[in-house]
Amino acid sequence: MTLAVVYSREFDGQALTLSASGYTYYYTFILFDFETESMWLPTNAGPQFESDTCGCTLVGITGQYAGRLRLPLTSTPILPWHEWYTNHPDSWVLKNPGLWPKD
Amino acid sequence: MAYKSNKLYNLYSQLIPASRRLGSLLLVVTIMLATLVPRGKATDVMSLEDHSYAVIYVDPPMTWVVAHDSAASLGGYLATITSQEEQDFVAGLLSEGDTAWLGATDMVVEGNWIWWTGEGFTFGNWLDGHPEIDSLNDHLQIIHADSGQWRDFSGQCNAFIVEWDCCSGNRTGNVNCDAIGKIDILDVTRLIDYLYITNNPLCCLDEANIDGDQALNIDLVDVVRLIEYIYGSHRPTAPCPSSGSDHPADSIILVDQSGKSWNVTNAVNFFGLDTFNFNFALGPGGHPAITEPEFYLPGDSGYPAPGETFSVIGVSIGNEHRAYPLSFMHYHEVVDDVYDSASVAVAY
């Protein structure tokens, strides 16, 4: 992915915890969810014209969610902080999470 | 009301006060229609053997993925064509000049065409020169001209064909296989959507013992009966489309560097992925998502100065704006965050 993409992670009434599975398929990170350990592969199919966008639609390829599709809510810009801040002076900023996940 | 199984009805009663029950339900349905169902018009529902079909025309046009989701919201799925008889029948639903989405794609692995329902992709009615090799055209369309021949296409289209399994006990009125055994208000609204939007395919309703008053006079009695029909004696037994093998002996298991096993049978056998192209295998700890993000708020000590130039991913959802410094994302790849209106994953 060269753009950042935002997905709703709400499925069937619960919020899944999506994370990188540690695998790539060719050059694409395969995501998975902790709850069902389904693998999710980003594909080129997108919400608008498909040839000019990033890998967008997630496809469930294994596990309970195999066959499910999830369109992105939105794709988002990557830009310098000062440009973002100028337009969004009330923005929150992610704190450094450190290298390791919390228990 | 004398019902054998009042579980659903009780659930429903808890959700919506008795006095407003049906009205509220219809309101919910209206909202569902407004949010899930594409704006547009449909042909009459036509049946071939025990399947029903309709052409849905939409404005604005939609991509295949959106059409896929819309067909699901109608209680069916994008039509599949697996025989000459079905081909002729579906082509006959189209009007002059129509082009419509069908339920096949090679979006996951180029050249590996699959019906999303899991049916075998054996029959074909391709236009000359199609499917195009190594193209970005990933999804299947049927076109009115030339006996309803097929082409691969991406982009958007102003019609799709929805198919319902009627009376088979699978998926009828039940949009998502994941809902099996978990009845909620969404299922109720889906059922009603199904009845109204499909113009009430009679073959299903007869078997479900729905009142003769039919769709336009549907009441809660009908809803409960329908749900009993779907979840009761006709409880779906078929797996979800492409939900994988039930035979462990046939399973394809990858073991990553952390020792974790991954059952990729379905990814390989159905979607056509190649096990040799699953790379790195670092395990889920290789790039752990940020699952409990903490933020600096404006005015906090540590909040970046306005002139800083580091790169961020800027996300706006509703009135909430959050910046995720790119330097953290290189390692973590995903932030699982919660906004007022949605739980989201920000993926880089």
Image (spheres, coloured by chain):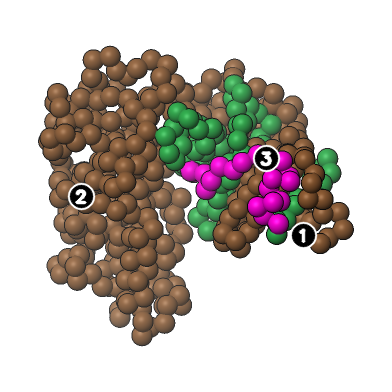
Chain colours: A green, B brown
Mark 2: amino acid:
Ala
Which residue has dot 2 on it?
Answer: B42
| Residue plotted at (46% across, 37% down) | A46
On the rendered structure, is B334 left or right of B175?
right
Position of the C terminus of chain B by quadrant: top right
| Residue plotted at (67% across, 43% down) | B313
Q: Chain of mark 2?
A: B
Which residue has dot 1 on it?
Answer: B297
Mark 1: amino acid:
Leu
Position of the N terminus of chain B by quadrant: bottom left
CA gap between label 2 and label 1 equals 50 Å
The image shows residue A71, relative to residue B189, as above or below, that is: above
Mark 2 or mark 1: which comes first in sequence?
A: 2
Q: Position of residue B316 (x, y in %)?
A: 60, 53
On the rendered structure, is B52 left or right of A66?
left
Q: Position of residue B213 (x, y in %)?
A: 15, 69
The residue tagged with tag 3: helix, strand or loop?
strand
Q: Nearer the viewer, mark 2 or mark 1?
A: 1
On the rendered structure, is B305 left or right of B279?
right
The image shows residue B18, relative to residue A17, as above or below, that is: below
Answer whether residue B164 is magenta in the image: no
CA gap between label 1 and label 3 equals 19 Å
Q: Which mark is residue A79?
A: 3
**Magenta residues (range):** A70-89
Q: Which mark is residue B2?
A: none
